Amino acid sequence: MKRFSADYIFPGNSSPIKNGVIEVDEKGQILNLLNPAKEAIDWEEVEVFEGIICPGFVNTHCHLELSYLKGKIAEGNKLTGFIKEIVNVRDQFAEEVRMKSIGEAEQEMWKNGIVAVGDICNGDSTLDTKQKSAIVFHSFIEVFGTNTSVADEAIAKAVELKQNFDNDRVTIVPHAPYSLSPKLVEKVIELNEGLMSIHNQETASENEMFEKGSGELLQSMQNFAPEMKGFSPTNKSSLQSYLPKYASTERMLLVHNTFTSAQDISFTKTSPIAIYWCFCPNANKYIEGRQPDYTLFLAEKCTIGTDSLASNWSLSILDELKTIRQKNMQIELETLLKWATINGAEALGLTDKLGSIEVGKAPGLNLISDLIDANISEKSTVKKIV
Ligand SMILES: [Zn+2]
């Protein structure tokens, strides 16, 4: 058994405990969480750290298979430019290079205290790494295709890929509201197993496409998908246009939400789906140069994603939290850590073991040091202690 303490313990699901003590067994299972304000502590053999201890992080959005694109895609190109560049460069890398980058990215996440990942897949290149990893992966097999004639083929490919993954933590999901034909959406919903993920309102022209039938996104899609010339707008935002179709799913991760409005958030209350708002602050900084209005979401279930190394400088949840804090000092650390831990575990269905420091769970323990005024700063670092 080991005993740890720090200036504060953030259990993830409850208020921080000043100088709290965690007892953990050799397998990382929590045996006790003690509060010195309420009970006598035997301080012998307690390893005391400066900083805070929180549960292992849950990264609810990544594309591990794109790790080889680190530093290869220009910043600030907006979503349409970003997609164009990925398509241009993605075939220039040998398989060996790609596989190596996936292994390194997985190691980077582990070192940065990430214990579970929701990972988008278009192929099986990440399979080997995932099978060997101590990180829990939920793989989201992504489908897209605006041409009705490719719907059957896209689904067949996804189903085959899903079988290769050979475990329970795999679901077939839509790429984005604008990139699937109605037929493909129907097929994805038929296969729905309760957990969905979708890229949501990542660029302003996504809303413009649905509201007015115009804009950069629709235009660029029409260039390579002639069927999009017949796209008819709904006069509603992207989210309000597509969400009702997915009403049969239990939980849904909406990823990015950079251009989501207060009305969109209220609209989700009319839906039976449990919505998890996944933010990827650094990818937004990298691609769009704009952040979501986080303050609209303070009463919502939010989670944090790193997105891929194609649009990020690191795979670190702490780095994502730092970016949120830069312009949102009013958001409490307790809230941010909840987004980074228990909410993500809940979204991915992993709360039996992960997401909070509670007796019986084995959530991993992260030490965050170099705080300023008991809060994270640009200089803060994370170290995995369990
Ligand atoms: Zn993504």
Image: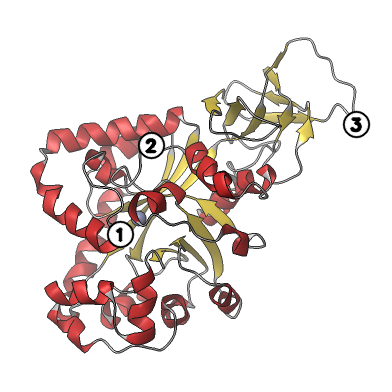
As rendered, which of 184 and 277 lies closer to the eye? 277
Q: Is mark 3 within 8 Å of ligand 1?
A: no
Q: Amino acid at mark 2?
A: Ser
The picture quadrant where one finds residue 68 is top left
Q: Quadrant of the C terminus?
A: top right
Tell me residue 127's x, y (percent).
Answer: 27, 42
- Side of 84 relative to 200 (left or right): left
Q: From mark 2 to mark 3, how far is it between C-alphas?
A: 40 Å
Quadrant of the rendered image containing residue 192: bottom left
**Circle 3: is it few (<14), some (14-19), or many (20+) Cα within 10 Å?**
few
Q: Is the CB–ligand 1 distance for label 1 below 8 Å?
A: no
Instruction: Report which residue position mark 1 lands on.
Output: 78
Measure the alpha-carbon separation of dots 3 and 1: 52 Å
Decide which of 31, 37 is in the foreground and name it: 37
Q: Residue at (35%, 43%) from the top-left corner?
A: 312
Q: Which residue is mark 2?
A: 314
* Disc 3 element: loop
Q: CA distance from mark 1 to mark 2?
A: 19 Å
- For numbered disc 2, what is the local secondary structure? loop
Mark 2, Cα crowd under 10 Å, few <14 / some 14-19 / many 20+, is many
Q: Which mark is residue 38?
A: 3
- Give the mark nearest the N terminus, 3 or 1: 3
Residue type at tag 3: Lys
Q: Is residue 276 above or below residue 368?
A: below
Q: Is residue 154 above or below residue 369?
A: below
Q: Nearer the viewer, mark 1 or mark 2?
A: 1
Q: Nearer the viewer, mark 2 or mark 3?
A: 2
- Residue 16 x %, y %: 75, 38
